[in-house]
Amino acid sequence: MPVKTQLLQLETERRRALVEEDYARVAELFADDLVYVHTTGLVQGKADYLDYARSAVQYLAIERGELQIRFYGERLAVMTGPQCNTLQKRGGDQLIRGEGFATQVWALGENGWQISSFHATRLFS
């Protein structure tokens, strides 16, 4: 299978795992040295992000537009494209819809392809 196809499937898997609260799978898709930058500017490592996803918010839907993937050698890829999250704060009932643009750095290591950096920027109209 072409690497580009594999990365697009892994990104689909990331979205599914977050919506279905499959945090074991989410943890597998993120590298241990993850740097995750939210649209709010909050910066978290892997453990803090997983705790945030488990306890602070519930992802109801994650939509992606057309994704561009650029390769830098055989072990590094940068994926960019629009993203729209629909979520709610745990214990709340108000839906939050956040439209943005995400940049993901995928690195190939001993655990396969994993996201080592995720940076989202909110889109303003």
Image (tube, helix red, strand yellow):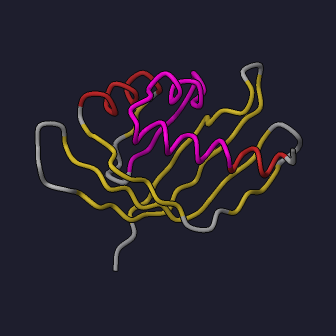
* Magenta highlight range: 9-38
Which image quadrant: the N terminus?
top right
Give the image location of residue 40, x and y in percent.
Answer: 31, 51
Say which residue appears at 47% left-offset and 39% top-offset.
36
Say which residue appears at 65% left-offset and 41% top-offset.
10
Give the image location of residue 81, x and y in percent.
Answer: 58, 63
Which image quadrant: the C terminus?
bottom left
Q: Viewer-proximal residue, 97 or 101? A: 97
Going by the picture, which residue comes out furthest to the front?
Answer: 20
108 within the magenta span: no
Question: What secondary structure predominates along the stretch shown in magenta?
Answer: helix
Q: Tell me where residue 122 sits by quadrant.
A: bottom left
Give the image location of residue 58, x and y in percent.
Answer: 28, 40
Q: How many numbered discs sit on the rendered protein?
A: 0
Give the image location of residue 33, x and y in percent.
Answer: 57, 25
Q: Is residue 57 above or below residue 33?
A: below
Say which residue appears at 77% left-offset and 56% top-offset.
70
Q: Tell me where residue 124 sits by quadrant.
A: bottom left
Q: Is residue 40 left or right of residue 47?
A: left
Say which residue appears at 70% left-offset and 63% top-offset.
68
21 within the magenta span: yes
Q: Is residue 69 above or below residue 114?
A: below
Q: Is residue 94 left or right of residue 101?
A: left
